[in-house]
Amino acid sequence: MNTPLRPRLLGPALIAGLLLAAGGPVFADAPATIDGAAIYEENCATCHRRGKAGAIPLTDTAAWSARVKEHGRDQLVARAIKGFSTPAGDEMPSRGGNDDLTDAQVAAAVDHIIRQTTAPATP
Ligand code: HEC
């Protein structure tokens, strides 16, 4: 005989799941489950590793630190999502040119860049 799933146990589990989802980050805060480094490697490194097409190279920690200080992390994320052109005419495509990336994935890639370029070495 089949015993139906017990709703009394399912209910609380569902509610806990919903609460977790609702309490999660709202805009562009990258959940820890998103691998910013991998997203960066796949979508951003072509330009940002060495500074191709006018992009700020990852090695230029002074320039990145200045950007973060000047604009703030959220502004950098917003520009990476929306795309960005400089007065000099250099262009970054929206989401690094990959429209499949979610806001959170782009944010995770930006956070990776920021970690690589501004953060003091952490264990
Ligand atoms: C086609 C080349 C290219 C790709 C691919 C690319 N970028 Fe850029 N990125 C640029 C250029 C050009 C700039 C502008 C440089 C400047 O401001 O001097 C830039 C600037 C930025 C900035 C600084 C924005 C600001 O407010 O100053 C961030 C952050 C950034 N990119 C993140 C990313 C991320 C994250 C990805 C991958 C999802 C990515 N980029 C992919 C070319 C690229």
Image (tube, rainbow, N blue to C red):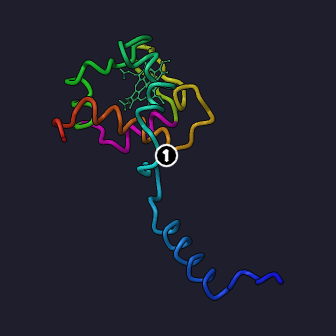
In reply to whether residue 74 is colored magenta, the answer given is yes
Total number of numbered labels? 1
Q: Is residue 77 above or below residue 51?
A: below
Asked which quadrant contains residue 15, the reply is bottom right
Taking the view exactly as shown, the residue that stands out farthest to the left is 120
- Residue lying at 30% horizontally and 42% vertically, measured from the top left: 72
Q: Is residue 24 above or below residue 69?
A: below
Q: Quadrant of ligand 1?
A: top left
Which element type, helix, strand or loop, lies under badge 1? helix
- Residue lying at 51% horizontally and 25% vertically, measured from the top left: 43
Q: Is residue 37 above or below residue 60?
A: below
Dot 1 corresponds to which residue?
104
Q: Quadrant of the C terminus?
A: top left
Residue 13 in the image: state x and y as whole percent: 56, 77
Residue 78 in the image: state x and y as whole percent: 45, 40
- Residue lying at 47% horizontally and 59% vertically, measured from the top left: 26
In this view of the protein, which residue sits in the foreground, 96 or 105? 105
Residue 7 in the image: state x and y as whole percent: 68, 85
Asked which quadrant contains residue 112, the reply is top left
User: Magenta part of the protein: which range?
Assistant: 70-81
In this view of the protein, which residue sits in the foreground, 106 or 2? 2
Asked which quadrant contains residue 57, the reply is top left
In this view of the protein, which residue sits in the foreground, 106 or 84? 106
Residue 29 visible to an observer of this rendering = no
In this view of the protein, which residue sits in the foreground, 66 or 45? 45
Residue 54 in the image: state x and y as whole percent: 40, 13
Identity, as a three-letter code, of the amino acid under mark 1 = Ala
Q: Is residue 62 above or below residue 10?
A: above
- Residue lying at 76% horizontally and 84% vertically, measured from the top left: 3
Residue 46 visible to an observer of this rendering = yes
